[in-house]
Amino acid sequence: MPATPRDIRVKTQPALATDLVLMTIRDRQIMVLVQKRHDARQVGGDWALPGTIVRLNETLEQAVQRVLHEKAGLREAFFEQLQTFSALDRDPRGRVVTVAYYALVPEAELTNRMPSDTRLFPVQYLGIDENGPLTKLQTKAGKTLTYAFDHARIVGAAIARLRAKLDYTTVGLELLPRRFTLRDLQGIHETILETKLTKPAFRRKILDRKHVKPTGRYETGRAFRPAELYERNYPGDIK
Amino acid sequence: MPATPRDIRVKTQPALATDLVLMTIRDRQIMVLVQKRHDARQVGGDWALPGTIVRLNETLEQAVQRVLHEKAGLREAFFEQLQTFSALDRDPRGRVVTVAYYALVPEAELTNRMPSDTRLFPVQYLGIDENGPLTKLQTKAGKTLTYAFDHARIVGAAIARLRAKLDYTTVGLELLPRRFTLRDLQGIHETILETKLTKPAFRRKILDRKHVKPTGRYETGRAFRPAELYERNYPGDIK
DNA sequence: CCAATAGTGTCTTTGAGACACTATACG
DNA sequence: CGTATAGTGTCTCAAAGACACTATTGG
């Protein structure tokens, strides 16, 4: 939570905060964790990204860890710096520069641990709009969520980053449990890219990159032929 | 310039600064603008990136504009946000979080306008080393420049970003004057990527992307067949 | 044996490197 | 008319999409 207005105004420097775009995938939709706001001085809607003021004795990464723990109940998760936002009017309570991060977690990690004032909302990629009063983001179902402050733009930047990094990094794996099928991974890619991918090409690409290795185990409980389970291949392992 | 230590210590929040990696290409080498430091409390070497404390009433971009103008004598230049650095011990004078930017300018824009306490130093890409006490960067000629603070790591991040964006954006054009030959552009790419490229493939790629268009003008004063001059093709133009 | 999905073999298409060729300006 | 560089045509190769085929499980 940002400091009170009085705290900010006496400073000669902008206050420094961090905001987190925590994403997961559920039912083939990208879901973002948002927190209900009750402050009357807000801009835009009632829903804000979880965030905090950065303390004097902590790094940005430590501040993000705090947010992950306190606002999402997570002890650890993949996260990465996104971008720093510094528009003069982005927060009406005072001058706050925020360093945005995004985090990725498997859906199962998240459910049951979320505080009661947070929700997961689906988002759809609408392209990056660097300017403009962008506070609303639509879901696939046509519903609209109105974000507080410039948080809709931050979410847009996070989704753009995720799309861009998907096929030359291993970020896709962060959205899956330890063991997963290649069909699951393809579903992750299809959801994020909003495309349909062809199975043989996708398998070749993934297997060629060696970021993933077969476990010899197979799914169970399915009505038909079970798929093999794969797991992350940490660099240094053979094959 | 960061504030004095007294200013910083009374705060309950980190101070916010920006540092700029201003790059150009000269004689097939990436050159970075650095500024001579005289402060005895420095960490590492005598050479620092130009930067400033961010004022209460300006955005990060406005602060970068000030640095470009005051430290490099430039009225305008291409620049883009790089990354925010927040290690607790990165500045021994106090707790300073810095938002790093990189800027690209054609060599001709820069020479003759640089303040007397600044220099252009060549850098060589050595891979990104996220951690480690990285203060020295080598030049191709084998010389070493010792940077102040964590500025060597910031320079490393800037070069990594430039390399990564080179072939799917138009950043290469920012390093050339308004009119240029395709050979010039190929030289820019070869310098940044530290590779040799084949002419036909390079031309096809560049021309297919339509970021550049022929002007019908040709270079003059060369002993042999003059090359056609190209210029940037702003989106919206036909062909 | 049937349904339905896992997994593969191969053809085609596309984009980049290799290489040799033609084109053109100056002296 | 020779020299040196500009610019192009074409072959090869590698990676990805298309599509059809085989493999395997529960019922």
Image: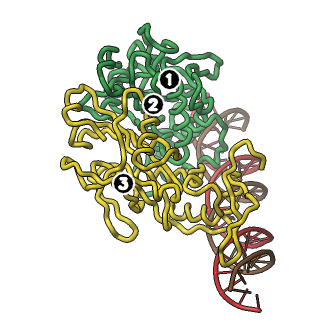
Chain colours: A yellow, B green, C red, D brown
Residue highlighted by disc 3 = A34
What x and y, as percent, mark residue B113? 38, 20
Question: What's under tag 2, amino acid-wise?
Answer: Phe
Residue highlighted by disc 2 = B85
Vertical relation: C11 (above or below) A158: below
Picture residue at 34% right of the left edge, 32% below the top: B76
What x and y, as percent, mark residue B198? 67, 44
Distance Cα–Cα, label 1 vs label 3: 35 Å
Vertical relation: A19 (above or below) C9: above
Residue highlighted by disc 1 = B150
SS class, disc 1: loop
Observer-side mark, 3 or 2, equals 3
SS class, disc 2: strand
Q: Nearer the viewer, residue B170 or A76?
A: A76
Question: What's under tag 1, amino acid-wise?
Answer: Asp
User: Which of the 4 image quarters holds residue B80?
Assistant: top left
Picture residue at 31% right of the left edge, 26% below the top: B12
Mark seen at residue B6: none
Label 3 crowding class (10 Å Cα cut-off): few <14, some 14-19, many 20+? many
- The answer to whether residue B105 of the structure is visible from this angle is no
